Amino acid sequence: MLRVVLLQLIVLAGDVYLRRRLEPADFGLYAIVQFALGIFLQFGDVGLASAFIRQNAEPTRRELSSAWSFQMLVAASITLVLWCGAPLMLDFWPDMSTDGVWVLRALSIDVLLSSARLLPSLMMERELEYGKLSVLDVMMSVAYYMTAVGLACVGVGVMSLAYAVLARGVCGVLGAHLLRPFRPSLVLDWESIRPIMHFGVRFQLKSIVGFLCTAIAPVYGGRALGQTQLGFINLAQSTANFPLQLVYAMARVSFPLFSRLQNEPKAFAKTLERGVMVSAMGVLFYVGLAVGLGANLIHVIYGAKWLPSLPLFYVYAVAGAIGFLHPVVAPAIDALGKPALNLKMMISWTVAMVILVAVLTPRWGALGFTIGFCIPVVFGNAVVLVILKRLVPDAHLWPRTRALILGCLAVMAFGRVLLAPACTGPFSFGLGVLASAALFLAVVGALDRSAIVEIRALVRKNNAVAQGA
């Protein structure tokens, strides 16, 4: 959680400057290129890292070295294909500028860099060394934003984002091997990694479907609406999903943890309840703030040129009030050995998204796209609640979240009625955020003091551990 707070302060400062310096069309182009890169990344990853994290036995050096060699061969092939095939993007996205070709070529090198840090990262995650992983993440984020802001400042334009990715990748390789040294052997023993790939491939199929879900925006939105409208969609979605960074941090920690608790149902359920409650506290406060002070947030932080994204931002934010649930619950389902269940759910709502987006976008443009994208998220996560009740009957989520929901509604009303007219500048907006946070905590504390007590207990426990260390 501390890592998320620090990272988001860095991300917010850098992203605000870049959004003000660059144009919506630049971010639309970058979103398209990231998608083109992501296709190969998803199909090139066979889930070996996740399989190693889940297995009970300690992986041997030969297994790890074979996995590294296999992943580097795949990465080298992907980089070569992307470098040669980059001009083909201009045929599919006629609205794209020729800068996109060189942006993709630059980003393709990051495929190799990501694979090069695979082993140290997965070993730190398997060993629950999240202090070291947090240091690595912060180092990479600082390298990215220092490079991007510096180059954007001297007029490099959209290429500043591509060069920043390369700087982040180099920093990640060096940092990972310094924090968790591991020198792989040049060996590729197919027999040693074949059993591990059985779980890894099933796990990665879920990630591929999730990627295809996010790909709807750059593929269909970029082609049907153009780079500028895609830029507005990108801002609305990324800003609304801001608190999900906390959720992803919880999910990252919880998968190896749930894997070790899979045979202890009471502890498993208690851990799941706590994860949902902590995630809901951050997400629901932000949803209340977004609906109450959304116009102020967009105008004050990003500038008037981004105000057309406001209706889209509201839709994404409201969907996030329940959309955070699946990222928290999915690691628990995977740890129970049921990645196919996650896969079926994600396929279902991805198909629904494609249909709804294709129907609503021609009618209502970017707003129709956003509504079509969010409807399956809402209904899909409602289904997750039903499935969770069957798989983990000892987990009781409603008592842990009802006070948080009421706190969210109170912050919405407070912002819309009283704060919005007054929060017109950075200082007054900051005071409005603090007042909203105070109201949220007061409502939650009055209705369910146990939630506040548990958060305080977690913080005190972490402080005690840090002092003891």
Image (cartoon, grey):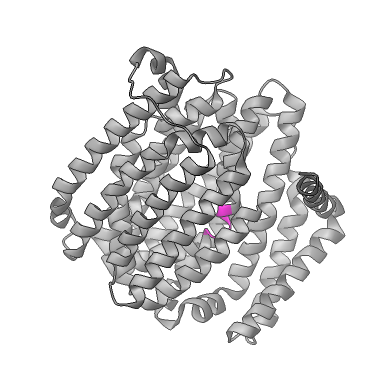
> Residue at 73% of width from left, 50% of height from top?
401
Q: Quarter of the image containing the C terminus?
A: top right
Task: Verify whether residue 204 appears in magenta.
Answer: no
The residue drawn where x is 36% and y is 65% is 366
Above/below status of 339 relative to 318: above
- Out of 141 and 379, give the one closest to the viewer: 141
Report whether residue 364 is seen. Answer: no
Left or right, residue 423 beside residue 241? right
Picture quadrant where residue 117 is located: top left
Q: Where 414 sits versus 145, above or below?
A: below
Q: Residue at x 60, y 75 (%)?
A: 293
Q: Position of residue 106 (x, y in %)?
A: 25, 55
Decide if residue 119 is in sight here.
yes
Which stretch appears magenta? 241-245
Residue 275 lies, in percent from the top left, at 68, 43
Spot occupied by residue 241 in the image (x, y as percentages of width and height) = 52, 58
Q: In this view, does 34 lie to the left or right of 347?
A: left
**Foreground residue among 132 and 320:** 132
